[in-house]
């Protein structure tokens, strides 16, 4: 993603995406910001007596996190971040953020708890799963808008597939989405289908009955 974003032209940055009203520039700013948010959280003190922890799946609950007010702020902040910036700026920010984050994560304890901007206490490892989801799913949006093949890493795709399909009836899933749990092309197609990026709701009832998680997304 860093390489692609660094190489964006002005024309590419202005292309529309399925995440209306964001163009490529605004969607890239939002996606990169999702990773930078981890650094902000790590700069805060670990909470004490935080109470029940929210899981990665629980983070995508259809509540205040994705309310009209929060979604409006999410949209506006990305537009502001993209306004006036060069087309390659999100790529530069991504590189800097990841360099800092890799060093920070290497020394964090495995049981580190962080608090999201919505006030949810989460294990850092679970919050990082949500970041992989954000970069992976919006990576598909960016690739589609730019007319490129998806660049999602195999490890990242496995994380997203595990969150969506973990604990589900694999046989039932494969009957609706062939290859969802067995190969890259099928996994990408399955992620598109379950996150509303396939253009069809076909098979949703069967997938829900099989235990597939349909996340609330902004």
Image: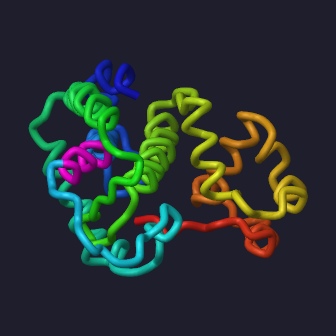
Can you give x and y, in whole percent of width and height, for residue 100 in the image?
22, 30
Residue 89 lies in the magenta stretch = no
The quadrant of the rendering that contains the C terminus is: bottom left
On screen, 2 above or below 109?
Answer: above
Left/right of residue 1 with respect to residue 150 in the rendered view: left
On screen, 14 above or below 96?
Answer: below
Q: Exactly how many numbered labels are in the figure? A: 0
On screen, 114 above or below 7?
Answer: below
Can you give x and y, in whole percent of width and height, for residue 186 in the image?
76, 41
**From where the camera sits, is residue 57 visible?**
yes
Residue at position x 65%, y 49% in the image? 161
Residue at position x 81%, y 40% in the image? 182
The quadrant of the rendering that contains the N terminus is: top left
Left/right of residue 43 with respect to residue 61 in the rendered view: left
Q: Nearer the viewer, residue 141 or 119?
A: 119
**From where the camera sits, is residue 13 visible?**
no
The secondary structure that most of the magenta stretch takes on is helix
Left/right of residue 195 with respect to residue 40 in the rendered view: right
Left/right of residue 161 with respect to residue 218 in the rendered view: right
Residue 38 lies in the magenta stretch = yes
Residue at position x 18%, y 50% in the image? 40
Q: Nearer the viewer, residue 84 or 74?
A: 74
Residue at position x 46%, y 39% in the image? 139
On screen, 172 above or below 118?
Answer: above
Can you give x and y, in whole percent of width and height, for residue 20 in the image?
37, 57
Most distant residue in the left direction: 84
Magenta range is: 34-42
């Amino acid at each position: 993603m860093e390489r692609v974003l660094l190489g964006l032209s002005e024309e590419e940055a202005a292309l529309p995406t399925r995440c209306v009203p964001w163009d490529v520039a605004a969607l890239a700013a939002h996606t990169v910001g999702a990773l930078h948010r981890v650094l902000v959280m790590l700069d805060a003190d670990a909470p004490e007596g935080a109470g029940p922890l929210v899981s990665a799946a629980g983070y995508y609950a259809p509540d205040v996190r994705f309310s009209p007010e929060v979604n409006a702020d999410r949209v506006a902040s990305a537009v502001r971040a993209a306004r006036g910036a060069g087309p390659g700026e999100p790529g530069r920010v991504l590189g800097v953020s990841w360099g800092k984050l890799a060093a920070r994560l290497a020394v964090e304890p495995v049981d580190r708890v962080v608090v999201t901007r919505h006030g949810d206490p989460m294990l850092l490892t679970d919050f990082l799963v949500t970041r992989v989801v954000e970069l992976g799913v919006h990576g598909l949006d960016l690739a589609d808008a730019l007319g490129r093949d998806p660049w999602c890493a195999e490890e990242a795709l496995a994380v997203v597939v595990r969150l969506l399909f973990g604990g589900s009836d694999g046989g039932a899933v494969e009957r609706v989405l062939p290859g969802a749990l067995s190969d890259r092309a099928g996994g990408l197609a399955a992620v598109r289908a379950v996150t509303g990026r396939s253009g069809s709701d076909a098979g949703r009832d069967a997938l829900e009955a099989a235990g597939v998680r349909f996340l609330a997304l902004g």
